[in-house]
Image: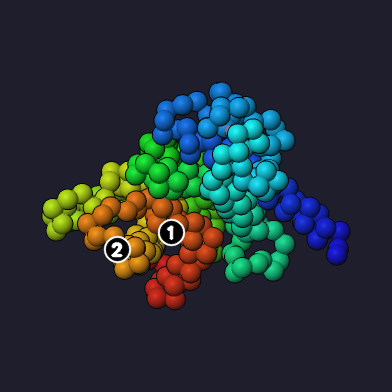
């Protein structure tokens, strides 16, 4: 392996570990934020016997396996959710990092234009994973993810305009990037709000929550209106496949509510890693002049 290859592998390991640690912190956030508890105090403890967890029993990925998924003092089972979130975030952090790194990029990833985008992607991953699991547990999307995402999306667009730079486009100004963020946020929340209204007219009940509306707004603020069209299509597709499967396999009724936030988050993650490249290639292929 060349010296650069070695360095790259070394940093990839660090990124993977950083992601696992972020996943570990996210487990705390997922549990505590909906209960409006502090995410730093008190320190981690077993939810069953309240024994504080020493640092070596709190090491991401490793501890859950070493403890054989049981609390060391009372033996209560520790949910596989913990290690799943740690591994998931480690993998997603690595994907964002691979977009920057050495050629050829694995898994069909397309390069990001500058290094500042990688920590921004990590921040977005944090929000999307937090929203996803809180929505699974409580059927709500915290405002700090959705509204926080809209505000942060605008701010970051201003300071890192490259976030909104299209493939093949030259440098864009902070004002241009902020405009694209605003258009994206309006397109995202507007289109889901319209879908929510139509859904209510057809099904005579709320098919979609205001949290979903705000989450799509946040995605538009970070990635522009193209990401909104993509995410609406992909989330509706995956959501209906999963919804129909649940009805068929588990005998759930067509009326039972499933959280929609996770599908929006999944669509946004696909957009970040692959979708934007597909989308702009498609646009370049179908539009002879630059109409977008
Ligand atoms: Zn315990």
Depth check, mark 1 against mark 2: the one in front is 2
Residue highlighted by disc 1: 267
Q: Residue at x 59, y 64 (%)?
A: 110
| Dot 2 alpha-carbon crowd within 10 angstroms: few under 14, some 14 to 19, many 20 or more | few
Task: Indicate if the residue with disc 2 has its beta carbon within 8 Å of ligand 1.
Answer: no
On the picture, is 15 further left or further right than 80? right
Give the spatial CA distance, label 1 vs label 2: 26 Å
Q: Is residue 93 above or below residue 1?
A: above
Q: Residue at x 65, y 67 (%)?
A: 106
Q: How many marks?
A: 2
Q: Position of residue 279 (x, y in %)?
A: 45, 67
Q: Is residue 154 above or below residue 99?
A: above
State the residue in front, 3 or 168. 3
State the residue in front, 177 or 245. 245
CB-based contact (under 8 Å), mark 1 and mark 2: no
On the picture, is 35 further left or further right than 79? left
Q: Element type at marker 2?
A: loop
* Outermost top residue: 42
State the residue in front, 15 or 54. 54
In which quadrant will I find the C terminus? Answer: bottom left
| Dot 1 alpha-carbon crowd within 10 angstroms: few under 14, some 14 to 19, many 20 or more | many
State the residue in front, 46 or 19. 46
Q: Residue at x 19, y 56 (%)?
A: 199
Q: Position of residue 4 (x, y in %)?
A: 82, 58
Residue 82 visible, this angle? yes
Quarter of the rendered image showing ligand 1: top right
Residue highlighted by disc 2: 251
Q: Position of residue 173 (x, y in %)?
A: 50, 47
Q: Residue at x 14, y 58 (%)?
A: 202
């Amino acid at each position: 392996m060349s010296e650069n290859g070695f360095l790259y592998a070394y940093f990839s390991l660090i990124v993977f570990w950083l992601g696992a640690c972020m996943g570990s912190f996210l487990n705390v956030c997922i549990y505590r934020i909906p209960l409006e508890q502090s995410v730093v105090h008190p320190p981690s403890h077993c939810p069953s016997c309240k024994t504080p967890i020493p640092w070596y029993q709190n090491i991401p990925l490793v501890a859950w396996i070493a403890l054989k998924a049981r609390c060391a003092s009372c033996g209560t089972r520790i949910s596989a959710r913990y290690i799943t979130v740690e591994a998931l975030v480690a993998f997603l952090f690595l994907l964002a990092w691979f977009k920057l790194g050495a050629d050829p990029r694995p898994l069909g990833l397309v390069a990001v234009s500058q290094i500042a985008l990688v920590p921004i992607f990590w921040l977005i991953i944090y929000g999307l994973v937090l929203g996803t699991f809180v929505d699974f547990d409580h059927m709500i999307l915290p405002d700090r993810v959705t509204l926080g995402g809209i505000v942060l999306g605008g701010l970051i667009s201003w300071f890192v305009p490259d976030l909104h730079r299209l493939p093949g486009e030259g440098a864009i100004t902070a004002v241009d990037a902020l405009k694209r963020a605003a258009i994206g946020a309006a397109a995202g929340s507007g289109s889901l709000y319209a879908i929510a209204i139509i859904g209510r007219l057809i099904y005579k009940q709320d098919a979609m929550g205001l949290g979903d509306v705000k989450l799509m707004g946040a995605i538009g603020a970070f990635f522009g209106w193209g990401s909104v069209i993509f995410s609406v299509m992909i989330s509706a597709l995956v959501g209906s496949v999963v919804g129909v499967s649940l009805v068929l396999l588990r005998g759930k009724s067509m009326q039972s509510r499933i959280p929609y936030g996770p599908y929006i988050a999944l669509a946004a993650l696909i957009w970040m890693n692959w979708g934007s490249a597909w989308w702009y290639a498609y646009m370049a292929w179908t539009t002879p002049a630059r109409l977008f």
